[in-house]
Amino acid sequence: MHFETLAIHDGQAPDPHTGSVTVPIYQTSTFAREQLEYKGGFVYSRIGNPTRQALEEALALLENGRYGLAFASGAAATMAALHLLRPGDHIVSGIDIYGGTYRIFEELLRPMGITTSYAEGSTTQSYLDACTPETRVIWVESPSNPLMRLADIRALAQAAHERGMLLAVDNTFLSPYFQRPLECGADIVIHSTTKYLAGHSDVLGGAVITNEEKLHATVKTYQAAAGAVPAPWDCWLVMRGLKTLKVRMKEHEANAMQLARFLESHPAVKRVLYPGLSSHPQHILAKSQMSGFGGMLTIEMKGGMEAVRKLISGVKLFLLADSLGGVESLIASPARMTLWALSPEERMKRGCSEGLVRISVGLEHPDDLQADLEQAIEGCG
């Protein structure tokens, strides 16, 4: 079946007891047992809940995976996936990653004896050059946050497997509508369901999806024991978002493409980073492993931070806010917001200059968004 049919029906069948066409919100902490001996089923909502199970099944199906697990946030999902590691293990990560993931690597895992090295480039060889005999996981964002760098998922998966390593891909920026890393050979897919999957800036959530039974069992054990699970209402909100994922992603992409082309021609803009543009250095790779280019783009202003401040203070439709993937358009300074925890030296090492602006393009009319940027960018050159 086609993606939009799966998103509406699979994992979200009518309730067998009442006929409700939407999955009920099982707002309960515990479940009555029919007998003392455990015979399966639901016993306690931290361990399993029917609403959460419906979401997990739907997420797995959309990623063309066998197993899905839902978490209370994207960060919780990241920690759950990394629970596969033990002291002495090593991670190779893309150098351009979400600041929250960097904090997990450096502030939480490193003191536990799990170390991380960062690939100096976005080529497969750059990741392999950073590997050691202790490397167990290669971690990538593709596209990355905020520089929109891509990893060749197929090549990286093959190289990782040849060396006995796992490949984990954060697919938050594209959603399974535009990219399915498991189909390219990745072992684990991570989402912040807060973003495009829910799509309305009203819920926190995360997900871990895999085809490997052993990986799933390990992460599920962690989920039940650690307990960073989403409430049934939060699961229901994400499932509601999944039903409109296709139509939203197509509009996000169309709006982003129009703004990217406009900004690329503006004299105040040094460069536009958007995989859908032919000027993107990995545009051919993008077309080979993505079915669309998403709604995220990053620009670099010629005037540095001064120009960034003028732009951000001048827009009227774009909201200055963290996060992304909602129906409303957001604007952010990576240097002052998403990567604030890194030192200026670390930011520059990762290519994050003071002049970067990250834009989450929403679902407003693209002409209105373009006009808003046009009036705000005047005098920023």
Image: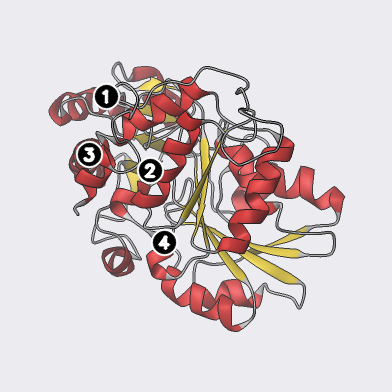
> Disc 3 or 1, which lies upstream in sequence?
1
Residue at x 59%, y 71% (from the top left corner):
127
Q: Is residue 356 in view?
A: no
| SS under mark 1 | loop
Quadrant the N terminus occupies: bottom left
Residue at x 78%, y 44% (from the top left corner): 108
Q: Earlier in the sequence, mark 4 or mark 3?
A: 4
Residue under label 3, please give it: 259
- Measured as percent of width and height from the top left, residue 113 is found at 85, 56
Disc on the earlier residue, 4 or 1 = 1
Which label was assigned to residue 181?
Answer: 4
Q: Which residue is mark 1?
A: 19
Going by the image, does 262 lie left or right of 349? left
Give the CA separation, mark 2 to mark 4. 16 Å
For label 2, the residue is 58
User: In the structure shown, which secondary structural element does the residue marked by tag 3 occupy?
Assistant: helix
Callout 1: 10 Å neighbours few (<14), some, many (20+)?
Answer: few
The percent coordinates of residue 28 (x first, y second) are 56, 18
